[in-house]
Image (spheres, grey):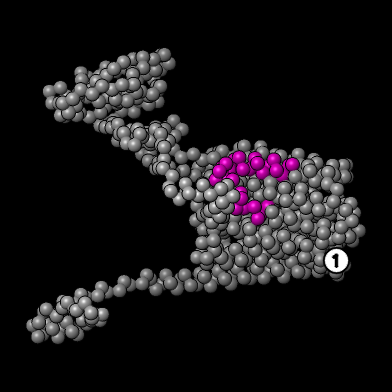
Amino acid sequence: MLFTTQAFGKTTPLRGWGLRSGRHRPSPPGHVSLLPPRAGGRCWSSATSSSSPRSVRSVSPMKMTQGNGIGETRDGCLHSEASGDLEQSNGIEKFQEVNECESEEGGQGGGSGGSVAVPGTVTAPDGGWGWVVLAATIVVLALTLAFPSCVGIFYTDLQNEFHASNSETSWVPSIMTSVLHAGGPFCSVLVERLGCRATVMLGGVLSGLGMAASSFTQSIEQLYVTAGVITGLGFCFSFQPAVTILGHYFVRRRAFANAMSSTGTALGLCTLPFLGNYLHTELGWRGSFLVLGAVLLNCCVCGALMRPLQPPKHRGQPLMNHGPPLPEEEKVTKEKGWMRRIWNYFVTALRKHMAFDQLCHNSRYCVYAIGITWMMLGFVVPLIYLVPYATAKDMEQGRAALLISIMGMVNIVVRPPFGILFSMPWFKGRHIYVFASALLVNGLSNTICCIGPSFPVLLVYVVFYGLSMSVVGSLMFTVLMEIVEMKRFPSALGLLAVMESITLLIGPPLAGVLIDSTGEYYHVFFACSAVVTSSGVFLIVAFSWLDKRDRKLSKQGPPSPLPEAARPAVDLAPDCQYRSVPTEGDKDKALCEGDTSSV
């Protein structure tokens, strides 16, 4: 069907804009539809006056019904006045609509009192599907962060199987934990390319395959690759995107959501030791690793539930966008070979996904990163050596594994109330001090183990350690989100994870060397106590000084702008490089003498 419109004294044919069959409100004489109605949508009409060919009348919407008789659609919002323009620029067709009455997100019409959504922005729901994402994050953290601590159940079996020392055996959980944190930059690149959902699922596949392959290893070096590198990299790809997407789903309840998600680590500490001990008794360490690899595949299920947030759809966006032409620099780069392209891409991704600028210019982030890096040198070591320490003094394997489970139970019970407590307004701006105080308690609690390896003593130890660990786990990401902007959180977390991986890598082997040289385990707990306690003291002192400095600067106020220099009235010679600015005394003197030309 061919339509014409009369405007500016010309008759212009409109091709390709046919009306669909169906009933509609009859248009006034002279109206011609400019836009094709969508299925069940609105029909926009434009009228031109025949008596006045140079005048263009306003556009009015018409309420449409579906031609099949199903009924009226949701797009029935009427306008008092609207205009529809058809732009054509560089092959891009774009419809601009004025006084839009509704947002198309979720099929909800915009009311008069509703907020107008900004195109391209995503609003955090602070609930809804976010609770499902929170539950999935809890399971992911239970399967990733808590897993290296449960390797201690198989510690003695690995030593006997491969005839390895304490230092050699401790490299297995050390490499696993280190790669878990060091893979942050690579994980950030995958999140940008694939999204959080696909990256979490990829991590589940890698970790499951790594643990399954570990059951077939014949040397401790092969175990370093399978259980250490492959499984640790899978943990990294599952853990970091889960924490990142949780920060996008929650803003107002972020502290509570982070505290609840941190219960995943406690859930893993509570359940994995029981599962590992049962599998160890029934299947041995090889069969246990094979079954645990299948358990880790559940990260794929959790990743599938992490639906990404989408910005609301708005009209007025380009129908197609060819994008600007490639600049000459990129064309030259593509011609230099694939090795050069890979290197340039790696350098660009490293700069983008590593917050080096925050480390150099954000003093709070720098202090926090240093304190956390030093803390990790001794924070996870007691979890690795607690079971070997207890079994070395003739404690049963089941009772020793029960200690780690009790620690996880304490975390499960304590973390939700702590999350609600830390969400209160009084704690705003004080989270870092609560976090550092918990580090002090955690470090000092390690000295309890030195009293003796009896079950009552170790029970008191795991209770104090679990309480302090729950506070540390609840506030670690919350403090980081307060220090850096949310849009820089993934890159800041990536750099912090890389820094942590260094101390996480060398911590357990150093403890193993200390045990091999002294023959006693309690020296390790003394060393861990000193490291963790000193990190807490450092954070308290450093942040107190930074807060004092900021308060002092806020009292002084912003620096007053310098007065503008008065321009001299007399033009000096070009060879004269000296310029004098008349002072207030010179101005007063000139006014008294009546010579205003010198002012």
> Looking at the image, which is closer to me, 125 or 167?
167
> Looking at the image, which is closer to me, 459 or 307?
307
Left or right, 530 with reference to 108: right
Write down the quadrant of residue 494 in the picture.
bottom right
* Residue at image coords 67%, 44%: 203
Q: Main secondary structure of the magenta part?
A: helix
* Residue at image coords 49%, 44%: 124
- Give x and y (percent) for residue 286: 85, 44
209 over 14 or under it: above or below: below
Asked if the stretch drawn in magenta spans residue 52, the answer is: no
- The residue singled out by tag 1 in the image is 516
**Which span of residues is magenta-colored?**
180-209
* Residue at image coords 65%, 45%: 238
147 over 47 or under it: above or below: below
Write down the quadrant of residue 198 in the picture.
top right
- Give x and y (percent) for residue 552: 45, 73
Left or right, 490 with reference to 407: left
- Which quarter of the figure is the C terminus placed in? bottom left
- Give x and y (percent) for residue 424: 54, 56
Left or right, 172 with reference to 116: right
* Residue 322 shows up from this direction: yes
333 over 441 or under it: above or below: above
How many C-alpha atoms fall within 10 Å of the one at disc 1: few (<14), some, or many (≥20)?
some
Task: Give the residue type at disc 1.
Answer: Asp
- Which quarter of the figure is the N terminus placed in? top left
> Looking at the image, which is closer to me, 240 or 469?
240
- Give x and y (percent) for residue 219: 85, 51
Element on which disc 1 rests: helix
For the view shown, which residue lies furthest in the left direction? 594
Asked if the stretch drawn in magenta spans residue 195, the answer is: yes
